Amino acid sequence: MSRFLKRDLVILVLAAVVIAWANGDLEGLLGIPGWQSYGVRIINMCAINAILALSLNLVNGFTGQFSLGHAGFMALGAYTTALLTMDMAAKDRVFFMTPLVEPLRNLTLPFLPSLILAGLIAGLFSLVVGIPALRLRGDYLGIATLGFAEIIRLIIQNVRKVTNGALGLKGIPQVVNLWWTLGSAFICYLMLRNLINSSYGRALKSIRENETAAQAMGIDLFKHKLLSFFISSFWAGVGGGLLASLLTTIDPVQFKFHLTFQVLLMVVLGGMGSLSGSIIAAGIVTYLMEFLRIVEETHYWGSITIPGIPGLRMVIFSLALVLVVVWYPKGLMGDSELTAQGVKAFLGRFRKTLRLKGGRPV
Amino acid sequence: MLEIIDLHVSYGAIKAVQGISLKVPEGKIIALIGTNGAGKSTTLRTICGLLKPESGRILLEGQDITGLPTKDIVRRGISMVPEGRHVFPDLTVYENLMLGAYIRTDRKEIEEELEEVYRLFPRLKERSQQLAGTLSGGEQQMLALGRALMADPKVLLMDEPSLGLAPVLVQEIFSLIRRIHERGKTLLLIEQNARAALTLAHYAYVLETGRIVMEGTGADLLKNDEVRRIYLGEGEVAG
Ligand SMILES: Nc1ncnc2c1ncn2[C@@H]1O[C@H](COP(=O)(O)OP(=O)(O)OP(=O)(O)O)[C@@H](O)[C@H]1O
Ligand SMILES: [Mg+2]
């Protein structure tokens, strides 16, 4: 095992223990009954969002293309996972209006192959969109993926024999726990980090910087962009699958554009082209999304009633995105990574500032 | 080594290159000079496959490479220093150089090439971890040259390597080009700085509105009255 991998594993285990401990849910970490508490649920969401942000960053941040289709690929992954993991009885309970088509009705797979298939199907569709869109120069990918995600959603809404239409799917087995979500996030991170540090990753970045010059290096622009888009969509599918299993209920409305927007916010906030930035931003946005639920709920203070405004959270996040882009266009991390030396240097500067301001050094 | 036969290239209705033929023999420096908009960069971009010609043929070592995708042309041994440098600004000097060697796979050879490039441009070695976008103009030009050398090309195409550089640096770049040639490279050099280019080149072509209007050895063209008047500036003729 490489030194790198060992260090990463240590960091991961420590992080998991600390997070679980902080939430008073150590038993949750171990997958013991009663693990589905609020804190653990948020960590699960953080991990899934990290996967989504990391994978979108690969295309938008590292390769310099502009995909707006994450919600579509997530929907493909979520429905694939749901339909493959639910057993026949569960399916029959849900599909009472229009029965599910036959081979799917009988088919039940374990979670892991379902999740991998979810990723592969999302990846397959990324080729369908990517092969025509990425051959052209310019931002056709943005338009194509935006349209694609909406088409996928409409198909899901209308092909009731397979997806149960607008009613959605309920009773998806809740297989995921922290092991699954954090484990997937970790594998996703490792895979992307190794990719980015390889000569392939260097080629992706050079495409982002200057397509003509990259081409003059002998780099096949189309092949690289497509690979980046495929891997990104694969992980969006896996993320969607994990989400379906975590929530146990999915419907087409969940996969509207606001979902892509939310992931995009994490990528921009964390820094286009920074993996650690995406992870940090996924944590921040997930926690804030939970925290800001307050504004959408109705509050009663004695005789005063403050009505909650549904959708206000997204308004706040849209404003946040605008502010980040205007005031902090490089995001939290720019395109650098969080390293031990970086943290030390930051703390050093922080101390110095405290001293200069007359505060006591800590 | 490289031969172009009756090349025509257009941008829509604009005929930028109208029947150019030229030869770049192995181990020689060939210069292509001409006024702004003469079609020099267009010719170079077409050789690299970045533009598709309307008609005409491009041969590398006798093989037809006309219309091949750029990646295949680069693999066959043609490397370009593009006009205006085009380094990758947010990547380090080291990463830029390694991208130059993208088509190569032998790690040991790449390492050796890198050492070689660092020997040629010690300043790049000092700044290997610096972002290319923060280099000075001259350093960026050296990086663009070094990056092209990393591919170990058979023919190196250079589009105005001295563009926008101070006179001292122009001299430095030209002496570097000479050293690159001495290492056995075949060069096709585009230049506005006709005097320096003609001094360096074994043979040169003069391009005007997409056509070759004159050709000859560098020394001959330097003596030619018309070349002196148009490309070297009348005032300089006496000096
Ligand atoms: N992308 C383009 N679209 C349309 N016309 C172009 C394009 N690029 C170049 N041209 C035209 O083609 C002609 C030749 O341009 P080219 O860049 O080859 O000239 P050049 O000899 O390299 O000039 P310079 O010395 O200024 O670099 C010019 O008239 C130019 O306006
Ligand atoms: Mg030019």
Image (tube, coloured by chain):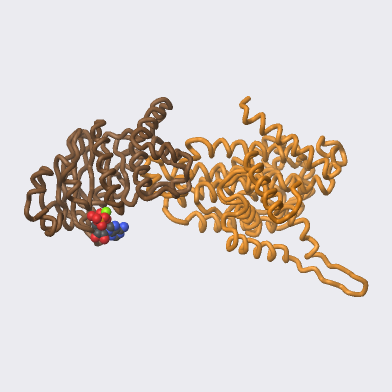
Chain colours: A orange, B brown
Residue B103 showing in the rendered view: yes
Q: Examine the rendered structure and indicate whether residue A254 appears above or below residue A312.
A: above
Residue A73 versus residue B105: which sits nearer the camera?
A: B105
Residue B139 versus residue A8: which sits nearer the camera?
A: B139
Q: Examine the rendered structure and indicate whether residue A119 appears above or below residue A297.
A: above
Q: Is residue B95 left or right of residue B225?
A: right
Q: Is residue B151 left or right of residue A64?
A: left
Residue located at (20% from left, 43% from top): B57
Residue located at (51% from left, 35% from top): A198
In which of the image's four quarters is ligand 2 placed?
A: bottom left
- Measuring from the top left, give residue B171's x and y in whole percent: 25, 45
- Measuring from the top left, give residue B73's x and y in whole percent: 31, 39
Q: Quadrant of the N terminus of chain A?
A: top right
Q: Is residue A182 left or right of residue B134?
A: right
Residue B54 versus residue B175: which sits nearer the camera?
A: B175
Residue located at (80% from left, 68% from top): A308
